[in-house]
Image (cartoon, rainbow, N blue to C red):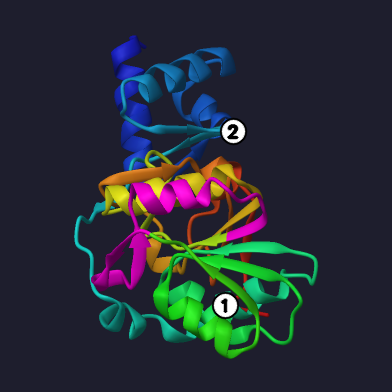
């Protein structure tokens, strides 16, 4: 079989199955594992598939440049966000110094917090109010205010953030994709999220199932840079990139 014919058969199999192992491809193509792995590497470099450990996945995803306001976002997947927030809150210990990103899922984390001696930094205006009302030690970043997402963003906020070193950070995201990583529509918010990841010992992204396979315009981190807390994971291939915790059944 010619190389181009193998390439096309691999892509046809992926179009049907969405994910395939090297072993399955060697049987389907009658080729050696070494040949199949070379083919997968070549197709990955051409941008035709996503190579993962032991096989490949199809390139799937929805591009979304839209940025809804907090009110609209808060009405979506409410039960899922609550479950994610409860689990995320359970990870915070009294000696932690925590960054909490603006967003509706991280808001549920704050709602789930009990008494704590941890310290919190946030770029969410409403988040800071929620934390302070609970009597928790709270700092808010200075910078430009973005009303649509109730967030402090931009270069000044990023410079503020550079003073801190966090034990944990909890971030929201608009999209989770093997190819694009964690993405958001706004470059200024992406800059702040990326800085938070860089300054945290442990970084968590809180993402309900609807965020997977979605790509927004700006990448703020690769998948391997953060653990993911989600309600349920439909595509097991994501586990080859990072640690993922499902909380729907907890």
Q: Magenta includes 149?
A: yes
187 left or right of 247? left
The answer to whether the residue labelled 1 contacts the one labelled 2, judged by CB atoms less than 8 Å apart, is no
Task: Between label 1 and label 2, give the one nearer the viewer.
Answer: 1
Neighbourhood count class around disc 1 (C-alpha, 10 Å): few under 14, some 14–19, many 20 upward: many
Query: Which residue is at a point 49% across and 45% down the rendered structure image?
Result: 195
* Residue 43 position within the rendered picture, expressed as x and y whole percent measured from the top left: 36, 22
Query: At numbered mark 1, what does the secondary structure look like: helix, strand or loop?
Result: helix
Query: Which residue is at a point 55% across and 29% down the rendered structure image?
Result: 22
Q: Is residue 223 above or below residue 205?
A: above
118 left or right of 26? right
Instruction: Provide the residue designation for mark 1.
Output: 109
Nearer-the-camera pick, 147 or 13: 147
Instruction: Report which quarter residue 5 is drawn in.
Output: top left
Q: Quadrant of the N terminus?
A: top left
Q: Which residues are magenta?
A: 143-169
Query: Which residue is at a point 49% across and 19% down the rendered structure image?
Result: 36
How far apart are the alpha carbons under marks 1 and 2?
33 Å
Q: Is residue 12 above or below residue 248?
A: above
Q: Is residue 167 above or below residue 3?
A: below
Instruction: Report which quarter residue 199 is drawn in.
Output: top right
16 left or right of 102? left
- Residue 53's disc is 2
Residue farthest toward the left in the current orientation of the protein: 66
* Residue 197 position within the rendered picture, expressed as x and y whole percent measured from the top left: 55, 47
Nearer-the-camera pick, 23 or 53: 53
């Amino acid at each position: 079989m010619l190389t181009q014919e193998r390439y096309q058969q691999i892509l046809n199999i992926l179009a049907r199955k969405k994910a395939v192992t090297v072993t399955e491809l060697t049987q389907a193509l009658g080729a050696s594992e070494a040949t199949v792995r070379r083919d997968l590497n070549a197709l990955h470099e051409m941008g035709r598939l996503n190579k993962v450990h032991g096989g490949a996945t199809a390139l799937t995803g929805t591009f979304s440049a839209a940025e809804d306001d907090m009110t609209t976002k808060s009405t979506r997947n409410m039960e899922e966000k609550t479950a994610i927030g409860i689990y995320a809150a359970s990870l915070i210990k009294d000696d932690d110094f925590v960054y909490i990103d603006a967003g509706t899922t991280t808001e549920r984390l704050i709602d789930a917090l009990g008494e704590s001696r941890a310290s919190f930094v946030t770029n969410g205006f409403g988040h800071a109010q929620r934390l302070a009302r609970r009597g928790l030690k709270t700092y808010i970043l200075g910078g430009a205010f973005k009303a649509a997402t109730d967030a402090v963003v931009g270069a000044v906020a990023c410079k503020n953030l550079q003073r801190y070193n966090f034990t944990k950070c909890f971030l929201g995201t608009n999209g989770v994709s093997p190819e694009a990583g964690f993405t958001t529509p706004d470059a200024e918010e992406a800059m702040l999220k990326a800085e938070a990841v860089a300054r945290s010992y442990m970084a968590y992204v809180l993402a309900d199932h609807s965020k997977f396979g979605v790509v927004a315009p700006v990448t703020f981190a690769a998948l391997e840079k953060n653990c993911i807390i989600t309600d349920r994971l439909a595509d097991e291939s994501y586990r080859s990139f990072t640690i993922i915790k499902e909380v729907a059944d907890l």
